[in-house]
Each structure stands twice: as structure tokens, then as C-alpha cells.
Amino acid sequence: MVCYDTIIVDTLLNSKNWVKETKPEAENLSSVINNSSRSIQDVYRLIKLLSKKEKEILALIGECKSNIDIAKSLHSSKRTVETHKTHMITKLCFKNARELFAFAVENKSLLKKSNVN
């Protein structure tokens, strides 16, 4: 499984259009991803890596919904939800679904705010 933090850092450091973040901040992205005590800004940076659908699913995971319940509420299949969860685990460099669940529960209120924006 490829961890996207290295790819993202390389992209940020080599991008000519990268204005919002400085190179040192991009270089620190990996430590942000692997740090259990993240600031609110760090959590928002991680959430920005996700697609709109992944953010919706992550918010529902934070509400302790099952894959089947998430699928019903989003009018998709259980397998689609599982695939999105796998992509989120990879993008955020978590080891397993348990870490994804813990992140979603810890940041439930921030996830609701990010889905509104």
C-alpha cells in the first residue's frame, strides 16, 4: 500500500502554483499525518486531502454508523463505502480501519464543519 504523504510532499515542493503553504510546512506533512496529538489546523489539512464523498463518509463513521447504514444514507453500496474507507486509510497513512475510526470520532465536530464548507 502506497502512503500518499510522500507523494503529496513531493508534489507540494515541486509545484509552481503552491502558494498557501511554505516548503517547510509541506516537509512537515508526514509528521502531521503520523502524529496522534494534532492541532485543529493539522486536522483541517488532513481533511482537505479527502474528496467530498470521503468527508461525508468520515463524518458518518464519526457518528459510529456501520458500513451498511452509511451506504443506505448515501444511496450507494456497502462495497463502495468500504472502497472509500480503504482510500481514506491510504491517503491519511493510517494502519487500519480502527485508526480511521478513532480519527473520525476524535474530530467529529470538525468533520461536520468541513462538510458544510
Image (cartoon, rainbow, N blue to C red):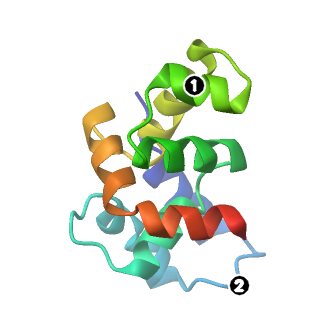
Which image quarter holds the C terminus?
Answer: bottom right
Q: Amino acid at mark 2?
A: Val
Residue bearing mark 1: 81
Which residue is most to the left?
36
Q: Amino acid at mark 1?
A: Val
- Rendered location of residue 103, percent (x, y): 33, 53
- Is residue 96 in view from this perspective? no
Q: Could you say which quadrant of the image residue 57 lies in?
A: top right
Q: Could you say which quadrant of the image residue 14 lies in?
A: bottom right
Q: How many marks?
A: 2
Mark 1 falls on what kind of element? helix
Work out whether residue 92 or residue 58 is closer to the camera in this orientation and state it. 58
Residue drawn at x 71%, y 84% is 19
Mark 2 falls on what kind of element? loop
Badge number at residue 19:
2
Work out whether residue 40 or residue 77 is closer to the camera in this orientation and state it. 77
Residue 50 is left or right of residue 64, and the answer is right
Badge number at residue 47:
none
- Separation of disc 2 and disc 1 at Cα? 33 Å
Upstream in sequence: badge 2 or badge 1:
2
Neighbor class of circle 1 (other Cα within 10 Å; few <14, some 14-19, many 20+) is many
Work out whether residue 87 or residue 31 is closer to the camera in this orientation and state it. 87
Work out whether residue 20 or residue 104 is closer to the camera in this orientation and state it. 104
- Is residue 69 in view from this perspective? yes
Which image quarter holds the N terminus?
Answer: top left
